[in-house]
Image (spheres, rainbow, N blue to C red):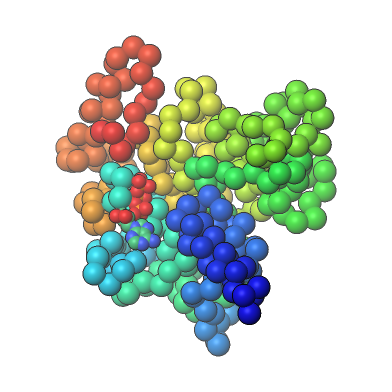
Amino acid sequence: MIQLYIPLNFLGVLYREIKQSLADMERLFSLLDQNREIADSDSARDLHIDHSEGGEVVFSHVNFSYESKRQILFDVDFTIPAGMTTAVVGHSGSGKSTLSRLLFRFYDIQSGSIVIDKQDLRDVTQHSLRRAIGIVPQDTVLFNDTIEYNIAYGKPGASKEEVVAAAKAAYIHDFIETLPDGYASMVGERGLKLSGGEKQRVAIARTLLKNPSILIFDEATSALDSKSEQMIQAQLKEIAKNRTTLVIAHRLSTIVDAQQILVLDKGRIMERGTHQQLLELDGAYAQMWQRQQNRQEQPDSPEPSVDEL
Ligand code: ATP
């Protein structure tokens, strides 16, 4: 009994810890292969994506709280048309990551609905939902294994050629070639430590292999050097092509090209529009933008995170 209890308890702790970070969502689910708190309904069907360029994602009047006493999202209502990019900005704690946890169906909402290509998340199997969504987390956790394994993880059974093609598309191939053992180099805690930008590029390669219809891109909070930043931006454009994309943004320059920007404040969408429309609106977003411009005029200062503005 004790023997059984300890690992289960450990898994419970692990589950709660990991649920908080988007970083390991996909890995955790593949370990447990089910979400312990959310069950598939008896009539659940596999999610079917109708659009070749990614599914349409609709949040309708979503209200959500983790705990009954404290509501986190209030009447959140938006659509991401198939193949388009929506970026969410807002101060720390405004609910940005919560949106992506809900899209992945980590939790069920209290009211409203979340629908992909006209299928409510509560009516589809979790397995098919997770297969359709790829996540590029802010902080990728690498396995203690070869870099090839770490990329191939996106598509079990992927060939070496596929891994190399994905690495090239994620601009990490040349770097890998400089490593002593190339693709066989060990990475992770007990191997080579990669920089934040390199890890994120591994995550991008992994996601390209997985080839999901819907992408969640969780931008790193910590500032990368401007070269890595520009590279990641270019890659985001690349991987967002033909996919429906939700970007959790921490820097405004990442999202100027997004078809829709949502400004979240204490769980409510306060403003929405394109970068240009929001500047013309001259509200909270325009102020953030202005403050960011002022900060950048100071020499050698990296682009500040929205959280600092
Ligand atoms: P950041 O930019 O700092 O990542 P965020 O906008 O992504 O912040 P969320 O992580 O979505 O914010 O959190 C929104 C609110 O929900 C916060 O007040 C947070 O404390 C609360 N919250 C998050 N996870 C839980 C949880 N598991 N249980 C209870 N409250 C939570």
Q: Give the residue at x 68% y 46%.
A: 143
> In this view, which residue lies farthest toward the bottom?
42
Q: Does 145 sit above or below residue 302?
A: below
> In this view, which residue lies farthest toward the left?
282
Residue 28 placement (x, y as % from top left): 59, 60
- Side of 123 where 300 appears, left or right: left
Where, quadrant-wise, is the N terminus in this rendering? bottom right
- Side of 126 where 65 appears, left or right: left
Question: Is residue 223 in view from this perspective?
Answer: yes
* Location of residue 155 (image quadrant): bottom right
Q: Give the residue at x 31% y 69%.
A: 67
Q: Does 32 sit above or below residue 262?
A: below
What number of labels is visible? 0
> In this view, which residue lies farthest toward the front?
2
Q: Give the residue at x 57% y 44%.
A: 140
Q: Does 175 sit above or below residue 107?
A: above
- Side of 205 where 286 appears, left or right: left
Query: Which one is nearer the viewer's eye here, 204 or 64?
Result: 64
Residue 35 placement (x, y as % from top left): 54, 71
Q: Give the residue at x 65% y 73%.
A: 3
- Side of 287 where 22 appears, left or right: right
Ligand 1 image position (quadrant): bottom left
Residue 87 placement (x, y as % from top left): 38, 46
* Location of residue 205 (image quadrant): top right
